[in-house]
Image: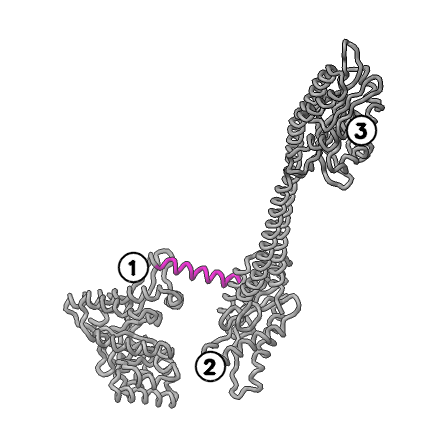
C-alpha cells in the first residue's frame, strides 16, 4: 500500500501536469484562433484585391467594347453614305456586299421608306417591320438589340437632305459574345451587357449566373444598401463593384461599367476566391501540417508524460520508500509528520527513535540475510502496533522512527514495551534464541511548528541517554544543555591546544622487587582559563567522537617528548613512559609516521616510549590485521607496546598469542575483591603465563596494603596506583623520583 505522502505527491504532480496541459491547450487554441483570424483576414484582403482586379479588367474591357460599338456605328454611317449614292439596287447590293466583308458586320440590310429593301446574306426579312428600324427613320444613328441578342447598327440614308431609307448593320449574338468574352481570370470570368433595368442585352455563353441577377435585387439576405447603391450607379452611369453570395452559396464579385450606349452596362462576374484558391490550398496545407505537428507534439508530450509518471514513480519509490522493508523511509516520515502533526495542538504527538543495540554482532554471527529478515520483522511488528493517524519508518541501518498520537509517559512506555515483546517474538521458533535489545528515545512534541529534524534529533539524544532502567528515555531540555556543553568544549579545543591549557601528568609505576620507580603513565589534564578544571571523563569520550582525540594524543605525545628531552639535557635517568593511543588513529593507515617524526625530532632513544592500546581495539575483526601490522611497525621504530585494561574482554588469552605485546596491564577490577580465591588464582595464572611468554605485567588501580602483599607473593613486576602516588605534574614527578622511598612505607 502506498503511503499518504506518496498520494499527496501524486496529487500535486497531477495538478501540476493538469495546469501544464491546460496552459498548452490554451496556447494551441490561441495559435489556431490567430491563424484562423489571419486566414479570414487574408481572404478578405484577397477578396478586396479581387474586386479591384475585376474592376480594372472590366474597365479595360468596357473601353474595348465601347470602341468596337463606336467603330461599328461609324462603319454603318460610311456604308450608309455609299448606299445613298447608288440608284441601281443590284449595283448597291453588290457594293454593300463587298464593303461589309471589310467590317465586323455579319450581315446588312437597306430598307427604303417605300417599303422596298435589299438584304445581305443571313439578314432577316422582317427587319423592316421591327420598331427599332422604323424609329431610325426619324432619328440619327442608333444601336439596338433585337430578339436573339443580335445588335442592329442603324443609320438613316439621306439623299438631297431627305431621309429615304435606313442602312442596318447586323452583328449576331455569337459575334458579340466573342467581343465581350475576356481572356482574363483564367477563363473563369463571365461578361454580359445589360440595360439600366438589368435586362440582359448580350449574354455570355453560360447564362446561368446572370439569370440569378433578379434574385440579387430581391434577396433579403444581401445588404440592401449595397444593392441600392448599385442601382443608383447604374442610373447615373457610374462604375462600381458589388460582392454577393450566389444561390449555390458561392461568393461572386460583380463589376459594372457603363458602355456609353443606350445606358447599357458591362457586367463582369468573377469568383471571389479566384485569387485565394491557391492561398486556400496553402492555408489548408498549413493547417494540415500544423494539425500534424500539434498531433505529433501531443503524442510526444503524452509519451513524455507517461515516461515522467513512470520515472516519477520510480524516483518516488527511491526517494520515499525504504528498499529493505518496502515501507516509508525517513524522508517520507518527515513529510507524513508535517501533514499530520505540525498543525496539531501541543503535546498531542510523540516522536520515538528506536535503536537496536549491538545489531552489528547479529549480522556478523548470523549473516546479512538473517539480519535483514529481522529488520523487516521489526518494521512489521511496529506497524502492527501503531494506530490510525500514526506512522513509522526505518531510518537506515537498525534505526526506526515512530510518530505516536500520545503524550502520557506511562502509556508510551506501555506501548513501547509491547512493541519490544512483539519484536522478540521471532525467538519462539528460532533454533538459536537471540534477544533483541531495544533502546528507545522519546520526544513529546510540545512545539508542533518546530522543525521535524530538530524533534528527531531530540529523540536521538534521549535514546543515547537510555540506561535500561525503564522502557524508554524521554527527552528533557537538560539533555540539550549537555549537548551544548559538549559543542562548547569542542569549540574550546583549538584555543586550548594553542595556549597549552592541556597539561601532562605522570602517574608512577613502582617495581615491587626493590621499591624504585620503574616508569610512568602519561595522562592529560585540562585547565581552561575561564571554565577551570575539566575532567578527562568529560572531554576524552567527547573528543573520541571526532578527530580532536587524534590531535590531543599528538599534543600529549610531543609534551612527553619535550619532558624526556629535558631529562636527557639534565643528565637525569630516563624512565620508560607509556602514553595512551586512541583507536580512532587506526582510521588513518599511516598515522604512526607522525609519532615517529616527533620521536626523531627530540632524539628519544628506542625502548623508552611505550604506546598503550586498549584491549577492545583488538576485538574489531576488520581492524585486527591492521593493528597487528602496526604493532610490528612500532617495534621497528623503537616503540614498546602495552595492552591496557587486560582481562576485560572475553578473548584476552587469544590476544597474547596473536599480538606481539610487550606489557599487559591488569585491570583494577581484578583487585576489587582480593580475598576471593578465584580472583587470586586468575591473577596468579595471568602473571605466571605472562612471565612464561616474556611479557611484563603491570597491576593498575592498586590502593591497599593487602593488594600489595598479594602482588608481591604473585611475583608481579610493576604496580601503579594511589597506594604509591596519584597522577603528578611534571615538576611533582621529578621531585617524587628524586626523593628516597621504601617499598613498604609501614615497614616489614
Would residue 239 appear left or right of 12 to someone viewing this image? right
Q: Position of residue 474 (x, y in %)?
A: 55, 67
Residue behind mark 3: 124
Q: Earlier in the sequence, mark 3 or mark 1?
A: 3
Is there CB contact under 8 Å for labels 3 and 1? no
4 lies above or below 201:
below
**In which quadrant of the rendered view does residue 486 lie?**
bottom left
Residue behind mark 1: 500
Quick one: label 2, few (<14), some, or many (20+) residues within 10 Å? few
Would residue 97 appear left or right of 373 to someone viewing this image? right
Q: Earlier in the sequence, mark 3 or mark 2?
A: 3
User: What's the CA distance linking mark 3 and mark 2?
Assistant: 127 Å
Quick one: label 1, few (<14), some, or many (20+) residues within 10 Å? some
Residue stretch rendered in magenta on the structure: 476-493
- Residue displayed at 39% across by 60% down: 489
SS under mark 1: loop
Quick one: label 3, few (<14), some, or many (20+) residues within 10 Å? few
- Residue displayed at 83% across by 27% down: 126
Camera sees residue 732: no
669 lies above or below 54:
below
Camera-nearest residue between 10 and 553? 10
Foreground disc of the pair 3, 1? 3
Classify the position of the N terminus by image quarter.
Answer: bottom right
The reply to whether the magenta stretch includes residue 489 is yes
Q: Position of residue 369 (x, y in %)?
A: 49, 80
Camera-nearest residue between 392 and 150? 150
**Label annotation for residue 367:** 2
139 lies above or below 356:
above
Amino acid at each position: 500500500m502506498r503511503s499518504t505522502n506518496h498520494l499527496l505527491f501524486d496529487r500535486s504532480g497531477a495538478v501540476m501536469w493538469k495546469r501544464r496541459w491546460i496552459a498548452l491547450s490554451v496556447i494551441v487554441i490561441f495559435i489556431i484562433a490567430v491563424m484562423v483570424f489571419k486566414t479570414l483576414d487574408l481572404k478578405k484582403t484577397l477578396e478586396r484585391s479581387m474586386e479591384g482586379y475585376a474592376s480594372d479588367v472590366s474597365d479595360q474591357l468596357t473601353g474595348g467594347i465601347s470602341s468596337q460599338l463606336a467603330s461599328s456605328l461609324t462603319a454603318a454611317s460610311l456604308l450608309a453614305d455609299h448606299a445613298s449614292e447608288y440608284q441601281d439596287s443590284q449595283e448597291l447590293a453588290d457594293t454593300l456586299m463587298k464593303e461589309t466583308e471589310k467590317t465586323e458586320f455579319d450581315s446588312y440590310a437597306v430598307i427604303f421608306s417605300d417599303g422596298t429593301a435589299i438584304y445581305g446574306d443571313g439578314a432577316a426579312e422582317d427587319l423592316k417591320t421591327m420598331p427599332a428600324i422604323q424609329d431610325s427613320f426619324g432619328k440619327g444613328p442608333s444601336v439596338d438589340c433585337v430578339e436573339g441578342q443580335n445588335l442592329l447598327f442603324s443609320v438613316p440614308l439621306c439623299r438631297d437632305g431627305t431621309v429615304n431609307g435606313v442602312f442596318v448593320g447586323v452583328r449576331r449574338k455569337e459575334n458579340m459574345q466573342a467581343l465581350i468574352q475576356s481572356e482574363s481570370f483564367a477563363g473563369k470570368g463571365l461578361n454580359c451587357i445589360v440595360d439600366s433595368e438589368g435586362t440582359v442585352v448580350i449574354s455570355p455563353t453560360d447564362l446561368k449566373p446572370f439569370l440569378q441577377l433578379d434574385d440579387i435585387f430581391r434577396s433579403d439576405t444581401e445588404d440592401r444598401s449595397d444593392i441600392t447603391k448599385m442601382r443608383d450607379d447604374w442610373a447615373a452611369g457610374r462604375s462600381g463593384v458589388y460582392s454577393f453570395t450566389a444561390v449555390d452559396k458561392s461568393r461572386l464579385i460583380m463589376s459594372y461599367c457603363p458602355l456609353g450606349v443606350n445606358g447599357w452596362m458591362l457586367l463582369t462576374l468573377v469568383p471571389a476566391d479566384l485569387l485565394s484558391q491557391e492561398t486556400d490550398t496553402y492555408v489548408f496545407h498549413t493547417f494540415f501540417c500544423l494539425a500534424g505537428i500539434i498531433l505529433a507534439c501531443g503524442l510526444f508530450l503524452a509519451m513524455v508524460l507517461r515516461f515522467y509518471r513512470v520515472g516519477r514513480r520510480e524516483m518516488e519509490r527511491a526517494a520515499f520508500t525504504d528498499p529493505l522493508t518496502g515501507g516509508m523511509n525517513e524522508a517520507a516520515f518527515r513529510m507524513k509528520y508535517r501533514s499530520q502533526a505540525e498543525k496539531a495542538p501541543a503535546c498531542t504527538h510523540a516522536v520515538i527513535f528506536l535503536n537496536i543495540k549491538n545489531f552489528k554482532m547479529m549480522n556478523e554471527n548470523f549473516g546479512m540475510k538473517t539480519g535483514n529478515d529481522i529488520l523487516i520483522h521489526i518494521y512489521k511488528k511496529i506497524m502492527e502496533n501503531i494506530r490510525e493517524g500514526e506512522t513509522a519508518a526505518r531510518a537506515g541501518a537498525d534505526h526506526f522512527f515512530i510518530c505516536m498520537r500520545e503524550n502520557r509517559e506511562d502509556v508510551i512506555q506501555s506501548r513501547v514495551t509491547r512493541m519490544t515483546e512483539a519484536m522478540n517474538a521471532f525467538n519462539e521458533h528460532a533454533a538459536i534464541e537471540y534477544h533483541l535489545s531495544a533502546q528507545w528515545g522519546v520526544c513529546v512534541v510540545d512545539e508542533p511548528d518546530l522543525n521535524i529534524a530538530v524533534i528527531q534529533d531530540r529523540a536521538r539524544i534521549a535514546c543515547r541517554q537510555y540506561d535500561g532502567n525503564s522502557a524508554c528515555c524521554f527527552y528533557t531540555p537538560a539533555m540539550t544543555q549537555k549537548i551544548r556543553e559538549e559543542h562548547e568544549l569542542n569549540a574550546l579545543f583549538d584555543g586550548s591546544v594553542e595556549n597549552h591549557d592541556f597539561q601532562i601528568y605522570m602517574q608512577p609505576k613502582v617495581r615491587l622487587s626493590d621499591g624504585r620507580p620503574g616508569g610512568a603513565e602519561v595522562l592529560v589534564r585540562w585547565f581552561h582559563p575561564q571554565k577551570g578544571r575539566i575532567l578527562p571523563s568529560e572531554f576524552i569520550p567527547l573528543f573520541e567522537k571526532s578527530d580532536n582525540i587524534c590531535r590531543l594524543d599528538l599534543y600529549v605525545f610531543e609534551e612527553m617528548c619535550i619532558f624526556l628531552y629535558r631529562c636527557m639535557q639534565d643528565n637525569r635517568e630516563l624512565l620508560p613512559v607509556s602514553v595512551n593511543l586512541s583507536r580512532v588513529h587506526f582510521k588513518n593507515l599511516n598515522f604512526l609516521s607522525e609519532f615517529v617524526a616527533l620521536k626523531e625530532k627530540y632524539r628519544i632513544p628506542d625502548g623508552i616510549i611505550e604506546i598503550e592500546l586498549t584491549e577492545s581495539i583488538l576485538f574489531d575483526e576488520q581492524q585486527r590485521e591492521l593493528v597487528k601490522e602496526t604493532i610490528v611497525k612500532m617495534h621497528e621504530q623503537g616503540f614498546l607496546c602495552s595492552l591496557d585494561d587486560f582481562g576485560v574482554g572475553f578473548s584476552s588469552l587469544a590476544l597474547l598469542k596473536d599480538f606481539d605485546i610487550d606489557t599487559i596491564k591488569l585491570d583494577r577490577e581484578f583487585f576489587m575483591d582480593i580475598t576471593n580465591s578465584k580472583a587470586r588464582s586468575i591473577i596468579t595464572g595471568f602473571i605466571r603465563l605472562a612471565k612464561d611468554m616474556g611479557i611484563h605485567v603491570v597491576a593498575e588501580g592498586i590502593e591497599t596494603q593487602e593488594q600489595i602483599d598479594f602482588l608481591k607473593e604473585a611475583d608481579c613486576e610493576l604496580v601503579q596506583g594511589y597506594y604509591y602516588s596519584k597522577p603528578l605534574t611534571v615538576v611533582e614527578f621529578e621531585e617524587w623520583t628524586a626523593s628516597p622511598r621504601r617499598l613498604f612505607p609501614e615497614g616489614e
